[in-house]
C-alpha cells in the first residue's frame, strides 16, 4: 500500500499548508468580503421571499446550492481555477457564489419569473452579469484566479446549471403531486356512500381534467 500511504502523507502536508496559508490571509479585506458575500444575499432574500411558498422556493435554492458546490469542488480539484481565500482552512471551501449568491439569485428568479420563457431569459441575463461583470471583479481582487477557465465557460455553466436545476425541481414537484393525487384518489374510493358519477367528478377534479 505504498501509494495509499504516500497519498495520506501528502494530504497531511497539504492540510498543514492550507492552515498556514489561511493564517496569513485571515482578517484580510478579501476574507471579510467573503463573509459579506455569504451573509448579505441571505438577508436580502429574507426580505424579498414570498413566505407563502417559502418551502418550495427553499427546495429550489437547496438544489442550486448543491449543484453549485459540487461543480465548484470539481472545478477546483481539476485546477480550472483557484480560490486562495476561504472562510476556514478546511473543506468545504466556502466559495461565496456557490453558497449564497447563486442560490439566492436563482431563488428570486424562480419566484419572480415563473414561466420557462421568462425564467430562461432572466437566467441568461444573470449569467451574463455574473460571468462578465462579477467574476472579473473577484479575479481583480484575487479571490478567484482563473487557470484553465474563462468567463465564457462560466456564462455557459450558469445557464446550464440554472435550467437543469429548474427541470429537476419541476420533475420532483410533479412526482410529489402525482403521489399525493394517487393517495387522495385511493382514500376517496374507500369512502362509503359515494355514487359513481360523484366519484368520477371528484377524481377528475383532483387530476385537473
Image (tube, rainbow, N blue to C red):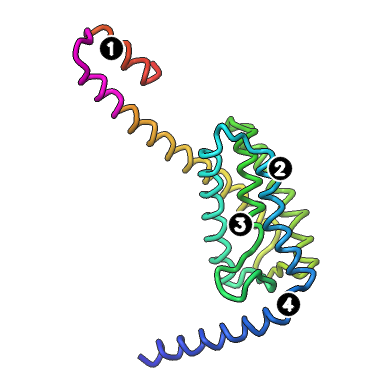
Badge 1 crowding class, 10 Å Cα cut-off, few under 14, some 14 to 19, many 20 or more, is some
Up-down relation of residue 115 to residue 54 (above or below): above
Looking at the image, is mark 1 or mark 2 earlier in the sequence? 2
Mark 2: few/some/many CA within 10 Å (<14, 14-19, 20+) = few
Instruction: Reply above or below: 57 against 146.
Output: above
Q: Would residue 17 be counted in the magenta stretch?
A: no
In the rendered structure, the answer to whether residue 203 lies left or right of residue 59 reads: left
Residue to which mark 1 is pinned: 200
Which residue is drawn at the image coordinates 54% and 44% (left, top)?
58
Mark 3 closeness class: few <14, some 14–19, many ≥20 residues within 10 Å: many
Q: Mark 4 points at which residue?
A: 25
Magenta residues (range): 183-195
In the image shown, does 77 or 84 lie closer to the viewer? 84
**Alpha-carbon span between mark 3 and mark 4:** 20 Å
Q: Tell me if 67 is positioned left or right of 185 in this view.
A: right
**Circle 2 residue:** 125
Q: Write down the residue under mark 3.
A: 99
Q: Which one is earlier in the sequence, the residue at label 3 or at label 2?
A: 3
Is residue 191 rendered magenta in the image?
yes
- Residue lying at 61% horizontally and 49% vertically, measured from the top left: 103
Amino acid at each position: 500500500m505504498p501509494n495509499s500511504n504516500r497519498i495520506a502523507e501528502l494530504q497531511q502536508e497539504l492540510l498543514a499548508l492550507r492552515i498556514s496559508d489561511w493564517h496569513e490571509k485571515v482578517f484580510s479585506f478579501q476574507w471579510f468580503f467573503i463573509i459579506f458575500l455569504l451573509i448579505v444575499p441571505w438577508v436580502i432574500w429574507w426580505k424579498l421571499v414570498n413566505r407563502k411558498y417559502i418551502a418550495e422556493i427553499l427546495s429550489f435554492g437547496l438544489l442550486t446550492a448543491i449543484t453549485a458546490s459540487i461543480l465548484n469542488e470539481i472545478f477546483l480539484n481539476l485546477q480550472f481555477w483557484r480560490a486562495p481565500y476561504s472562510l476556514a482552512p478546511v473543506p468545504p471551501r466556502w466559495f461565496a457564489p456557490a453558497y449564497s449568491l447563486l442560490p439566492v439569485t436563482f431563488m428570486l428568479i424562480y419566484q419572480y419569473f415563473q414561466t420557462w420563457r421568462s425564467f430562461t431569459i432572466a437566467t441568461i441575463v444573470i449569467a451574463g452579469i455574473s460571468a462578465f461583470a462579477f467574476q472579473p471583479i473577484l479575479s481583480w481582487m484575487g479571490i478567484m484566479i482563473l487557470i484553465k477557465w474563462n468567463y465564457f465557460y462560466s456564462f455557459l455553466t450558469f445557464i446550464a446549471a440554472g435550467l437543469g436545476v429548474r427541470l429537476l425541481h419541476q420533475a420532483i414537484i410533479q412526482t410529489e403531486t402525482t403521489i399525493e393525487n394517487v393517495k387522495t384518489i385511493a382514500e376517496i374510493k374507500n369512502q362509503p356512500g359515494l355514487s359513481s358519477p360523484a366519484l368520477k367528478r371528484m377524481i377528475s377534479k383532483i387530476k385537473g381534467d
